[in-house]
Image (cartoon, helix red, strand yellow):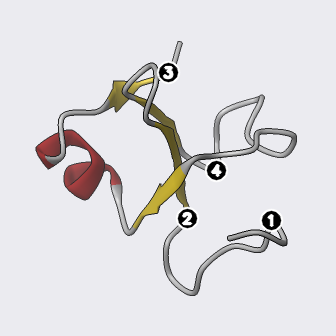
């Protein structure tokens, strides 16, 4: 979203350029500015994304 707000129920942040995602337990989650959001890790993985390191 343009205002950086969490879309309702979509807590997984992801980046199209690196095909990676972060969950709320990742240390960098708070300051991360995602390209897309996913409902859960399963949805991100089905879309071809992998966990960020």
Q: Do the residues labelled 2 and 4 touch (CB within 8 Å)?
A: yes
The residue lying at 57 percent from left, 87 percent from top is 8
Element on which disc 4 rests: loop
Mark 2–mark 3 distance (CA, rounded to whole Å) = 14 Å
Q: For residue 45, what is the image quadrant?
A: top left
> Would you name the residue on which mark 3 appears?
52
The residue lying at 12 percent from left, 46 percent from top is 46
Element on which disc 3 rests: loop
> Would you name the residue on which mark 1 appears?
4
Element on which disc 2 rests: loop
- Reading the chain from its start, which is encountered first: label 3 or label 1? 1
Which label belongs to residue 45? none
Q: Which residue lies furthest to the top in this view?
A: 53
Which label belongs to residue 11? 2
Mark 1–mark 4 distance (CA, rounded to whole Å) = 15 Å
Labels 3, 4: front one: 3
Could you say where residue 53 lies in the image, as x and y percent from the top left?
53, 12
- Reading the chain from its start, which is encountered first: label 3 or label 4? 4
Q: For residue 27, what is the image quadrant?
A: top right
Mark 3–mark 4 distance (CA, rounded to whole Å) = 12 Å
Which label belongs to residue 24? 4
């Amino acid at each position: 979203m343009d205002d950086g707000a969490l879309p309702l129920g979509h807590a997984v942040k992801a980046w199209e350029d690196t095909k990676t995602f972060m969950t709320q337990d990742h240390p960098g989650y708070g300051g991360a500015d995602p390209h897309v959001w996913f409902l859960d890790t399963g949805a991100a993985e089905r879309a071809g994304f992998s966990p960020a390191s």
